[in-house]
Amino acid sequence: MLAIIGGSGLTQLSCLEISNRQIIRTPYGEPSGPLTFGKLKNEDVVFLARHGHGHTIPPHAVNYRANLWALHSLKPSHVIAVASVGGIRSDLIPGRLVIPHQIIDYTHGRKFTYFDTTDQRVTHIDFTIPYCQQTRVLLLQAATHANEEIIDGGVYAATQGPRLETAAEISRLERDGADMVGMTGMPETALARELGLNYATLAVVANYAAGRGTNVNGIPLREIYAVLERAMVSVRNILEYVVSRDGY
Ligand code: HPA
């Protein structure tokens, strides 16, 4: 079964034929909301809205551990995390879709690991390649079949939020090698690896990052939602191809 985590702009998966919703409790507390089970193109899918059904949970308050634990308990074939980002690299203009291949963590104060108790051996995970390559390829191939333009690769900078960045912060992220910036990529990506999930991110560029493109004097927030709404048509289209190629 494919698992989909929906971000801003994708709090519901309208193309999903819902069969039931299930509240799952985990040792880490409750996920952002009930898991929604249903069929997409006749294939089983589970969907979880990262920010809650009504988009009320800010990025720093998301219970990432509970979310990933709940999905992991269902043994999904792949986990696809849809996430909105600000574009730093010049080709990452609003509306573009991109599958990041690397991530840098600038978040703090979040519950970022399952390995934080003293009753188990100290555990380090390999995180050299943070995203599951097989899942990335699944997304890239689905996009090709769906006739949707998509960019293969980019470095995701995960910031703390909920405020957007300053122009100087974006310049710093760019000097660090970041191509896009979002607030939810960490610890979600690392927790997925700790659980051994086949996890990749489908990033949607919602806006030029602060100080970039047409946003030299500020980010017009109202436009972000309009961009996301349009882009989600492509996202849904790609997800439909992903499930039909998932091969389970
Ligand atoms: N910065 C951080 N997170 C974001 C942005 C941004 O510009 N756009 C969408 N998520």
Image (cartoon, rainbow, N blue to C red):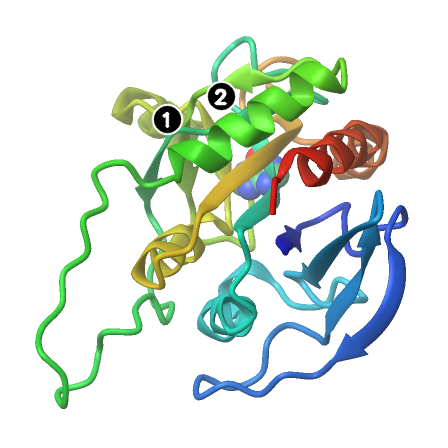
Sooner in the amino-acid sequence: mark 2 or mark 1:
2
Residue where numbered disc 2 is placed: 88
Residue type at mark 2 is Ile
How far from the left and from the top, in percent, is residue 234? 79, 27
- In the drawing, does residue 89 fall left or right of residue 106? right
Instruction: Give the vertical position of 13 relative to 57 (above or below).
Output: above
Q: Position of residue 95 (x, y in %)?
A: 72, 22
The span from disc 2 to disc 1 (Cα, nearest Å) is: 7 Å
Q: Nearer the viewer, residue 198 or 158?
A: 198
Q: Residues within 10 Å of mark 2 (few under 14, many from 20)?
A: many
Residue 218 visible (yes or no)? no
Please give the residue where the numbered disc 1 appears in the rendered image. 178
Please tell me whether residue 91 is drawn above or below residue 243 in the rendered image: above
Q: Is mark 1 within 8 Å of ligand 1?
A: no
Question: Which class describes the residues within 10 Å of circle 1: few (<14), some (14-19), or many (20+)?
Answer: many
Q: Position of residue 146 (x, y in %)?
A: 76, 20
Amino acid, disc 1: Ala
Q: Is residue 151 visible?
A: yes
Question: Farthest front residue?
Answer: 248
Tag shown at residue 224: none
Query: Do callouts 2 and 1 mark residues in contact (Cβ within 8 Å)?
Result: yes
Considering only vertical position in the picture, is 189 above or below 27? above
> Which quarter is ligand 1 in?
top right
Q: Does residue 149 sit above or below 176 in this rendering?
A: above
Q: Residue at x 57, y 88 (%)?
A: 25
Q: Quadrant of residue 101?
A: top left
* In this rendering, position of residue 175 left or right of residue 80: left
Q: What residue is drawn where x is 54% and y is 22%?
A: 211
SS at badge 1: loop
Secondary element at image label 2: loop
